[in-house]
Image (cartoon, rainbow, N blue to C red):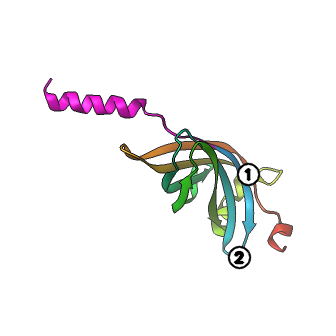
């Protein structure tokens, strides 16, 4: 093994053992019903073990139901993680009405759909560079009722 390989292994070990912020999706809920679609809001809790704030580069998301992608996108430059603290992030996920209509047969009797939300939280760790923390959540979300549409 030459010196370059040793150096690569050393760096890889250090990066693997570095403390990383820990994140979880705490809630996904209906936020807004508009003319062009429905906005759900995913709440993400992130614990930063470092004393300094860490910039968040972006949050990417994919929302699936019945095995189909019903919404995807990114939230560019959503701010920073507070140092030595828990930061609560809100990720708006917009679903067009046309997609919800196509899900009609998968809607339960209680007006909800099964969902799977995949999030990628990309942060800029000093020295290491950009890393993405993958998050996933499954559950049921309510669809708006007709009264929600006309509020």
Q: Mark 1 and mark 2: span between their CA atoms?
A: 20 Å
Question: Which residue is labeled 1 in the image?
Answer: 141
Quadrant where the image shows the N terminus:
top left
Q: What secondary structure is marked by label 1?
A: strand
The disc, 1 or 2, on the residue closer to the chain's N-terminal end is: 2
- The percent position of residue 36, horizontal first and vertical second, equals 66, 74
Residue marked by disc 2? 35
Residue drawn at x 47%, y 50% as measured from the top left: 122
Residue 52 drawn at (x, y percent): 51, 47
**Quarter-of-image position of residue 8:** top left
Left or right? Give the position of 8 relative to 99. left
- Look at the image and give the residue range highlighted in magenta: 1-24
Q: Can residue 123 be seen from the camera position used here?
A: yes
Question: Dominant secondary structure of the magenta stretch?
Answer: helix
Q: In which quadrant of the rendered image does the C terminus lie?
A: bottom right
* Residue found at the far front of this picture: 51
Asked if residue 23 lies in the magenta stretch, the reply is yes
Magenta stretch: includes residue 125: no
Give how far across and how far down residue 4 sits, in percent.
16, 32
SS assignment at label 2 = loop
Is 48 or 149 nearer to us in this picture? 48
Residue for point 49% across, 54% down: 55
Front-most of residues 113 and 28: 28
Q: Residue at x 51, y 55 (%)?
A: 60
> In which quarter of the view is residue 34 placed?
bottom right
Q: Nearer the viewer, residue 87 or 148?
A: 87
Q: Residue furthest top?
A: 1
């Amino acid at each position: 093994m030459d010196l370059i390989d040793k150096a690569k292994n050393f760096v890889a070990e250090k990066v693997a053992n570095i403390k990383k912020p820990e994140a979880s999706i705490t809630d996904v809920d209906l936020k807004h019903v508009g003319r062009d679609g429905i906005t759900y809001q995913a709440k993400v809790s992130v614990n930063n073990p470092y004393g300094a704030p860490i910039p968040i580069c972006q949050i990417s998301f994919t929302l699936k139901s019945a095995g189909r992608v019903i919404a995807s996108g990114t939230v560019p430059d959503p701010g920073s993680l507070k140092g030595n603290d828990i930061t609560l992030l809100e990720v708006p996920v917009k679903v067009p009405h046309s997609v919800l209509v196509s899900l009609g047969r998968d809607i339960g009797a209680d007006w909800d759909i099964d969902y799977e939300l995949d999030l990628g939280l990309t942060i800029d760790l000093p020295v290491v560079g950009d890393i993405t923390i993958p998050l996933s959540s499954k559950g049921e979300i309510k669809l708006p009722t007709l009264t929600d549409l006309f509020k």
